[in-house]
Amino acid sequence: MIDFYTAATPNGYKVAIMLEECGLEYTPHFIDMAAQEQKSPEFLKINPNGRIPAIVDDGFPVFESGAILIWLAEKTGKFLPTDAKGRSTVIQWVMWQMGGLGPMMGQLNVFKRYFPEHIPAAIDRYERESYRLFGVMDGRLAASPYLGGDAYSIADIACWPWVRAYEWPGLTLDNHPHLKAWADKVGEREAVKRGVQVPPRPEMTDEAKKEFVERAQQILA
Ligand SMILES: N[C@@H](CCC(=O)N[C@@H](CS)C(=O)NCC(=O)O)C(=O)O
């Protein structure tokens, strides 16, 4: 049995989508990040880094979303090729997401939406870097149907929730047509549609968005 610790964020959705894609049984536990539950002593025993997502699979804890995707792919034999080159290609894109796309878009969110101080140079740096990374994916997807090659894989599952969230820091996909077409195609998958409902998140009103940003600003202050 898999216990899944998560919240409504791109990193959480990666794992939710993978669990749904693999048809695995799991129990979701929603972590209240505004209440800092991810820093509680109980949670730190599962993830010493104090962040979501994390899973406990038959008593074995796994943290870092990329590591969880690889764990689940190896457990099920799905969404990760077994030949050395195919497997390496997919893992390269997962690592690229973990070291680049996620952190850069994450910092853009912080400096554009949550940080108490307005620092144009930081916003500019992370915005440019996010667009550069969009360009890298766009180029790859001009030549290949999926990031990892011909087949949908954990590389797509790792990147898609971040691309989907492009509007939150005020980005656009208009200049990246291959990326936009891929994002639409992946978003049509039934398991992906189910995954982004874990935790359930109805369309946010402007008021709810404002409250969310205020809470994030308080945490960062
Ligand atoms: N590299 C980590 C990043 C995890 C991460 O940054 N999680 C955020 C939510 S998306 C979090 O838990 N933030 C709360 C905090 O920093 O206390 C992963 O991919 O799992």
Image: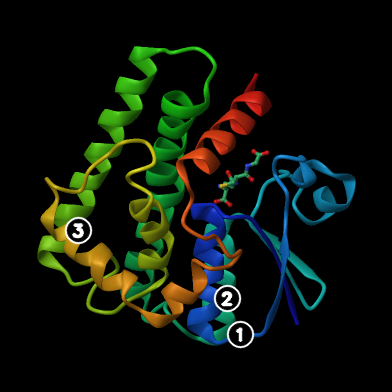
* Residue annotated with mark 3: 180
Q: Is residue 99 above or below residue 26?
A: above
Q: Is residue 221 above or below residue 165?
A: above
Q: Nearer the viewer, residue 26 or 116?
A: 116
Q: Amino acid at mark 1?
A: Leu
Mark 3 vs mark 1: in front? 3
Question: In the drawing, what numbered circle is on residue 72?
Answer: 2
- The answer to whether mark 2 and mark 1 are in CB contact below 8 A is yes
Query: Ligand 1 is found in which quarter of the picture?
Result: top right
Crowdedness of circle 1 by 10 Å Cα count: few (<14), some, many (20+)?
few
Residue 25: x and y in percent read 66, 85
Q: Amino acid at mark 3?
A: Lys
Q: Nearer the viewer, residue 62 or 24?
A: 24
Q: Is residue 90 above or below residue 53?
A: below
Q: Earlier in the sequence, mark 2 or mark 1?
A: 1
- The answer to whether mark 2 and mark 3 are in CB contact below 8 A is no
The picture quadrant where one finds residue 12 is bottom right
Q: Is residue 5 above or below residue 186?
A: above
Q: Earlier in the sequence, mark 3 or mark 1?
A: 1
- Residue at point 35%, 28% (across, down): 126
How many badges with numbers are in the image?
3
